[in-house]
Amino acid sequence: MKTPPEPPRNPPPGNPLQRRDILKTLGLGAAGAAAAAVLPAGDVAQAMESPQEQLKTRYRETEHVKRFYALNRL
Amino acid sequence: MARMKFLCDSERCIECNACVTACKNEHEVPWGINRRRLVTLNDGKPGERSISMACMHCNDPPCAAVCPVDCFLQTADGVVLHSKDLCIGCGYCFYACPFGAPQYPRTTDFGSRGKMDKCTFCAGGPEPDGSVEEYQKYGANRLAEGKLPLCAEMCSTRALMAGDGAILADIYQERSVRRGYGSGAPGWSTAYGRNERGSPFAPGGPGTGGA
Amino acid sequence: MLVKRSSAKTAGNKRSGLVAALADTLESGVSRRGFLRRSGLAAGGIAAVGALPGAMIRKAEAGPILPNVEVVTRKNVCTHCSVGCTVIAEVQNGVWVGQEPGWESPINQGTHCAKGASVRELTKGTRRVKYPLKLVDGVWQRITWDQAIEEIGNKLLEIRQASGPDAVFWLGSAKFSNEGAYLYRKLAAFWGTNNVDHQARICHSTTVAGVANTWGYGAMTNSYNDIQNSKALLIVGGNPAEAHPVSMQHMLRGKEHNRAPFIVIDPRFTRTAAHATEYVRIRPGTDIPIAWGLLWHIFENGWEDKEYIRQRVYGMDEIRAEVKKWTPEEVERVTGVPGAQVRRVAEVIAKNKPSTVIWCMGVTQHTVGTANVRALSILQLALGNIGVAGGGANIYRGHCNVQGATDFGLDVSTLPSYYGLAEGAWKHFSRAWDVEYDYLKGRFASKELMEAKGIPTTRWFDAVLAKPGDIDQPSPLRAMMCFGHGGNTVTRMPDMVKGLEKLSLLVIADPHPTTFAAIKERRNGTYILPACSQFETDGSRTCSNRSMQWGEKVVEPIFESKDDYTIIYLLARKLGFANEMFKHITVEDTRPVPEDILREMNRSCLSIGATGQSPERLKMHMKHQADFDKITMRASSGPCAGDYYGLPWPSWGHPEIRHPGSAVLYDTSKHVMDGGGVFRARFGVERNGVSLLADGSYSKGSEIEDGYPEFTMAVLRKLGWDKDLTPDEMRVIQAIGGGGAEVDNVSWQTDLSMGIIRVALKHGCVPHGNAKARAVAWNLPDPVPIHREPIYSPRPDLVKDFPAIEDRRDFRLVQLARSLQFKVADSDLRQRFPMILTSGRLVEYEGGGEETRSNPWLAELQQSMFAEINTRDAEKLGIRDGAWVWVYGPEDGSKAKVRALVTDRVGGGTVFMPFHFSGFWQGESLRGNYPPDTDPIVLGEPANGVTTYGYDPVTFMQETKVTLCRVEPA
Ligand code: SF4
Ligand code: SF4
Ligand code: SF4
């Protein structure tokens, strides 16, 4: 199993991904998506994140997340 | 460093299955695969309690320990992910998982079961965050969008919580104090390690009066 | 084929640790899911699901993400229950691609139940009706909208010509928006009949009748949110954990924060009862005895609120006399509840005030439904809990807009806003609609029929099958226009099928084909019109707590479907009265504009205060949801500051005066302009020399510090307040009064200028007057609620002590009651049908269930129709868990083949069946009868295939909760 280096260094810079429009930044056109879809699973390996990236923290304590915690305290 | 955890408050869970359908909706999970499901104790009898279960994103995941192709990875925030490209569908992880989380799309007694699927903590997979490939194989990556698992975000009674384990423990403790009794949140000790969070919530501890 | 995680079986049962323990329970077969999983999936289900994606690595179109496409967020409201959860939809390219939690909604705060969390599927439309269809010799044919409207219209006109307008039954829907409901009622009025009804008949008609006759209005008095203020909760005949799941968020918070006792009275140990601090199991059909049993202890110990009763309640002494009979021994004899437990519960609700009483269909769906409702209302009055935050009668309505559809008159006994059907009501609406009263009268067969209650939806098939002389209208029903209504939620389905067979025209306008379409007896004369869901149009809907929420169109109507407004307009145009009907409503192309419809409602629906909720205000509330407090529901800042969320009616007067709405009805601690109120003076000012007006109780700031009658011009004059009317207002009032002395009779309800209302408010008074609530409702069949055994009583020995009401006529039909009850009791039926049959809901499905059983995300969770049977009974009958059984009903040789769920959830001798299933009939699948590709994924036997006769005398509510049955292994 891959686990993150210990102890984790600075959390990766908060690169606030916006849902769904992240794709714009990737420049994937509709054709690209369709092509990706028919690729056999094994062939998309080059589209993988680097091992480092795969283990990075995804969680960020955004306003959205804070709102969730607050509502759970009610 | 925040570690991602689920906590299902069985005093609140009403077995409504919103968590289950929210997951289906968010990730377009096909018929036959349930990343999350409900477990009910004493169904129909006094003391009936339910909890919503998925992959618990264990600190020391037994599934990863047995995987012959080492397809699991654990992110820095404690989410257990796996690679469907590496997975050979052998089913070992299913045997190892104490929660029955891994699922396989095909059901034959011999041969491939298909690539294993399980709850991703709404964190996608090894592909780039938010990419089409990632969505196709693992579903949405809400964590990368600054959100939390949809199952927890939509839970009807705020029974199911997800997020930073330390904060959840805090919220849960507040609730127990308010109620004047705790309830052993099933799965807590397995997922967190027996000693990590202290005793009030561990099965048999003083906080388990309602269980 | 993949079936419901059966992989768990093949992949091995050997599990370790916690889940092994948990799974053991699951697989011992006592859980709904466990049993279903083992029982597998019916063959039909598999066929339907074949088209669903099976592999985990999906095709591109299955994923909701589209690159480089803008995401638009739209706000609408869940279409599945009266809680009214906000739905946040993410739309790309006109396709609904994602659902997000609506944190800001004060009601659901981002949460949903299984149904709400899956509504996006509705607009994917795999199983939807896609274009108009016509049944020709048993085969479904695709037709155009033009052809459909043309043929349907011609047939309707032909029937009208031959048999009169009353030969058509217009069945509307609680899934309409308010605007749709109002428009449909208006359509029936212009067509010329009162045979127009909707689901409220079968869920809470008795609640509306019961509480309106007690304190003035037929609605939940407080709100879901307000339950967080309760110090004790008493839930009677309701299972909100399944029927209104998000309400449990508020209820459980109330329980935790206030350490409030949470008491559930129900024949079945429901999932709600699982969270109770005290569970009381009663014999089905004994709600009045238990209510009186509680009140017996309250009176005996002097726990009642004597000052409240003196000031605000009429007739409590007569109640005392009846309650005296219900000693602990008598209560135990009839209900089966031990005396000590009744006393304990009585003490808890009396000493932990404010305490709230919550009820649902376990109370309402009885031959004594109205009396049940009144008994619980009186219990709350005795405790002084009405008009108090944290108290109240919290009546959980069913469908997402059943409150609104009721308010806006989809009812056989009233025009919109409960004006009734008397001449004055018609005159009011002829003015509001700007048509001559005589024109409307001319549309009806006679003035008499114009003012006579129509045929309710519980009995429509009796009205089809009736011989001409047996029915109080010129002809039996010949056509049914059925909008948004499953057919399997009404009792006595074998008779319904006969009725369906005999109809010359059946029109179904619905997103799904419904049970009506699948009945094999019909081969011609059936049309299906694809109506869209509320996510494909806009309009307002009223949740149970009377808040009105504006839903925004998420996507355009899918396939060829159209919204209700358009379909109603097309029909009106074809039938020849569109110009009159839409005189003041803009029609864009063929679509009436919902905002305009709402404005017309605001102008005319004075009597419930549905006047302040302009489309502009409602939209503003939706936009600024975050400003509203999550318990009081009041905005403290922002453009809605001071308003209660959704302007829960009454929101008196013109929108411009900015009445905030009324979160808690009849709350005297607040000024009327602050949402305060008093009991409505609806039944005169005195009876037999006793005043009916409040005694020294009034809402805060009222200039009249005592009871007062409803406001009319005469009252204003007497008070000298008529001088406050503006000349414009005066002119309208004069015109309505027709000049002369009649002007004095113009009241707050008929004054279209709303001047009388404005003046009353100005003086701190409530326009409807300030009266006492009525513990005794002399106009009802049982002025004081008394216990009556069900028609099919499981206790024939009690029938003579508690007989049903005498046989009678009402709603144009005969109602059998006592004669049938005695016949049943005197026969050997009880021996042949030894079990009690009761019915209820499941969380995954809604109503008739076609819509939800068509949604794979929900259907997967509940794949079989079942009957719950007590463990000991099952053992006696040799029935294994999961086995097929026949459930036989006592009428018509009726039967249903279902799976047995052996559980102690039901008591010994009781069988429970959920009512959401259809598509099987007496063991036979009807899948082939549905139009192609519209058959729901999951089909099952309808519970109402075996239910029986029995109606409430006030509303003709059906008895679904108590009948007899026999169970045998199949
Ligand atoms: S965290 Fe996401 S993937 Fe896991 S169960 Fe919840 S919704 Fe499904
Ligand atoms: S949504 Fe919440 S309450 Fe409903 S089943 Fe899931 S965890 Fe339980
Ligand atoms: S069905 Fe009711 S409780 Fe469930 S999400 Fe819809 S409105 Fe909310």
Image: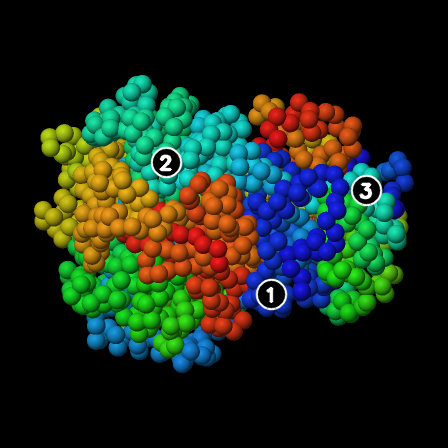
What distance separates the C-alpha of mark 2 from that of mark 3?
51 Å
Chain for disc number 1:
C
Residue labelled with disc 2: C393
At a point 53% along the width and 37% down the height, the residue shown is: B45
**Can residue C644 be seen in this snapshot?**
no
Q: Residue B28 at x, y = what percent?
A: 66, 58
Front position among marks 3 and 1: 1
Q: Residues within 10 Å of mark 3 (few under 14, many from 20)?
A: many
Q: Residues within 10 Å of mark 1 (few under 14, many from 20)?
A: some
At a point 26% along the width and 47% down the height, the residue shown is: C825
What distance separates the C-alpha of mark 2 from that of mark 1?
45 Å
Tag 2 and tag 1, C-beta contact below 8 Å: no
Residue type (three-letter) at the residue carrying disc 3 = Pro
Residue type (three-letter) at the residue carrying disc 1 = Ile
**Can residue C168 be seen in this snapshot?**
yes
C267 or C870: which is nearer to us?
A: C870
What distance separates the C-alpha of mark 3 from that of mark 1?
35 Å
Residue C287 versus residue C488 in the image, above or below? above
Q: Residue C309 at x, y = what percent?
A: 26, 25
- Quarter holding the N terminus of chain C is bottom right
Share a chain, discs 2 and 1?
A: yes
Residue B61: numbered disc: 3
C579 or C471: which is nearer to us?
A: C471
Q: Residues within 10 Å of mark 2 (few under 14, many from 20)?
A: many
On screen, residue C952 versus residue C968, left or right, reads left
At a point 78% along the width and 66% down the height, the residue shown is: A36
Chain for disc number 2:
C
Residue labelled with disc 1: C46
